[in-house]
Each structure stands twice: as C-alpha cells, then as structure tokens.
Image: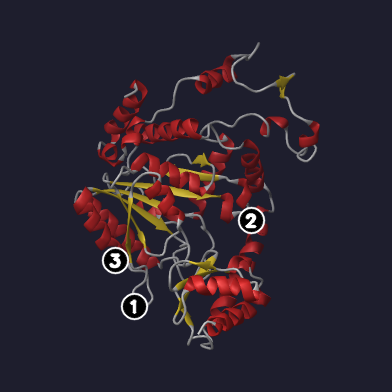
Amino acid sequence: MNPLAQELNELIKQDNPAVIDMLSTLGKNLFMPKGILTQSAEAKEKAHKFNATIGIATEGDKPMYLDCIYEALDEFKPKDLFPYAPATGKPELRKVWKEKMIKENPSLAGKLIGTPIVTNALTHGLSIVADMFIDEGDYIVTPDKFWGNYRLTFCVRRGGEVATFDTFTADGGFNVDGLLEKVRDCGAAKGKVVVLLNFPNNPSGYMPTVDEAKRIADGLVEIAEEGVKIVAVTDDAYFGLFYEDSIKESLFGLLANRSNNLLAIKLDGATKEEYVWGFRVGFITFAATEPKEQNNLLTALEKKVAGLIRGTISNCPHPSQTFVLRALNHPDFAKQKAEKYEIMKARALKVKEVLSSGKYSDEFDYYPFNSGYFMCLKLKNVEAEALRVHLLDKYGVGTISVNKTDLRIAFSCIDVNDVEELFELIYKGCKDLH
C-alpha cells in the first residue's frame, strides 16, 4: 500500500476506525498523489516570476484560446473557462453549493459536514461511492423500484449484490419496515451494508412523508448502533421537486452525525435541480459520524475522492462549473427556478387528476407519486415491454418499461395540456393488445 494511502487511513482511524471497515479494498488504497497537481497548486501561490508546471498553454497572463470558441462565451473571463479546474472542483462553487445545501435542508443546521466535492454529475458520484465502498459480494440495499443504472455501477463494475424490498406497503406508503428488515438481514450476513436512499425516487416519483423519513433515519441509526457498518447514500438527483405532502429536505440531514457506525453521504447536483442535464455538474458530500469535529476523517475521505477523480477523469469540466456558479449567484436565480417548479408541479398534479378519474382503472393503476420527474403505471392485462413497443410503433408515444408490469412516464417533458391525450393513447394501446 502506498504510504500516502496509509497516511489517510491513519487519519480516518484517529477520528473513527469504523469507517475503515466500510471502505472497499480500492477505497483503502486510494490517495491523492503529491505529483503534478500538488506541485502546480504550490506554484500557483508562489511562482510570481514564471510558472512552468501544469500542461496548459498561455499568452501573457491568460490561457491560450481560439477566438472561434471564446466568441460564444465572451461574457466570461478566460481564466474561468479554459484552465483545468482543481480535482475537487472550483472552490467558489463548492462554497456556494454548501451554503445552498444548508439553507435548503433545515436538519443540517449545526451539523458537521465536509465541503461538497464536484463530480461529473450524479452517475459519477455513484461510481465514486461504488469504488470506495463496494467489494465483490457486498450488499447494496434499495427499493425494488430503482434506477437501472445502479446495477451497472454497483454490480457489473464492482461485483456488489443489489438486495431489494417492496417499495410500497399495501396501503400505499413507503415500506419503511421492509427497508429496515433488509438492512438487518444483509448486515447480519456481511457486517456492512450500503443503503441507497433515492428520493424523490426514480422511477416511482415518491418522496417519503415526514414520519416515514424519521422512521427510516432512526431505524438505520438503531441498526448501526447494534454494530452493523452502514454507508447511507442519499441520491438526491431530483431534490427540491416536492409537489405534495412529503418531507421537504434530504434524509442526509437526518442521518448526519448520528452514529460512528453510520457514514452519511449526499449525492446531488445541478443536473435535474437547475435543468442543466448536459452540463454534468454534481457533488458528493460526506458527513461526520458523530457531533464533534472529525476534520481528519473528512479531509482523508476528500483526498481519497480527489485521488480517485485524478486517476479516472483527472478533473471535471471547468466551463460548466463556471456557468452553474454564475447561475447560483444570479439575482433572478430563485425567481426563475420557482417559475420552472410551478410548471413541473402543474404537470404532476394534472397527471394525478387524470389518473384519479378512474376511467383507466380496468387497464392500469398508478403507484404513489408526489415529486420528481416521473411516475409509474401498474399494468393489469399486458406486459410493459410489449406495450412500450406498440405505443412507439402505432402512436409515436415513448415510454420506459421498468419490468413486466410497470411503465414509467416522464411527466417532466409532457405539457400540461397534453397529459390527458397521453393517457388516452396508453389506454388505447392496452386495449389494442388484448
């Protein structure tokens, strides 16, 4: 093992040895090399005469660039576009995102958390978690309604095993007991569990109620206190898009600083929240495991993430970080975001209104939804994949088949005036097939 990795592991042990047991073999071996980036950072501070360190080209005191590129971006300074960003991301953006996170999540008040590290959006953040915490055979607990890319990220890449439970109870609430039972079972078998808490959920569009969220957090803490090492990951890709009765913040704040056997990690980003899917700007944030200073732990985990980023993609794109930072600081940011939220909410409520009419209930019901971009239909008489293909071929309607019975609808891209026609066509498609 590299001495730098050993040094980081010792820092973690000083604050909380339990976190070492949560790390994968790769996670234990990660470190941020003291190479070109470190030396270049030192030179940036001290090389006032000549800086001949990092591999970019300059003209005068500015980065070299092509006018044909810059003319589309000339509202920005070249230094905020063309040079490499630090491996952990643009410092100003990290600071502003943390401030935003604390403001929007009241449960984080007074909690000890690290500074968000920039990722190349949410999937990259999930990949970092997988690399750092999943060894072959480790369990990843998630509801049975989960984003299919989890399998590629955690199972195909890292050899983990997804352990699912029924997402909903018979009366339509989130299955908290099923989650906790599955965590206990997996914890008893392996001693360590990664729990993925994706809310608002993709594909179902469900966000837990305040009571459900509290029961989830308290239950996980109880299991951790019994000795199971839990890595609790909140996949908050659709954060903020809460339309009805639900908790209005991430579960991250309810899990942070609660147990030395529970490491809370928040994944979020501008991708869905700020409607900039192609920008690929996300964040990973670690919480201390108890309510006291754990700077060694948080610093070591940050450096391991930095080393992982350095060893895979080197760093995340600088221009998109600059664009997001500018948006967050824009005087009309909150107003513009609120306007888009109202559009999304109107679509979601229209979908619920149309489906609650009962006119389609002989062919499909719908799973509970109150947030996010999506909702799911539960088909009664036809298979989802057959219906998906038929809708596409005959009616030009695109949907996603999740499994044999479930069809995912992205109401995020359906105008409110088109919602009823969409479900009429889906209903016709069902009738066509039997």
Q: Closer to the camera, 398 or 210? A: 398
Q: Which residue is mark 3?
A: 178
From this view, report whether residue 363 is shown above or below residue 169: below
Give the side of residue 406 with respect to residue 291, left or right: right
Q: How is the image coloured?
A: secondary structure
First in residue order: circle 2 vs circle 3: 3
Looking at the rendering, in which quadrant would you find the N terminus?
top left
Nearer the observer, 169 or 251: 169
The disc placed on residue 334 is: 2
Examine the rendered structure and indicate whether residue 276 appears above or below residue 73: below
CA–CA distance between discs 2 and 1? 39 Å
Sequence-wise, which precedes: disc 1 or disc 3?
A: 1
Q: For the residue marked with disc 3, what is the amino acid?
A: Gly
Toward the viewer: 80 or 145? 145
Q: Choose top left, top right, bottom left or bottom right for residue 67.
A: top right
Residue under label 1 = 170
Question: Residue at the location (25% across, 36% down)?
Answer: 17
Tell me how far mark 2 sits from mark 3, CA to CA. Answer: 38 Å
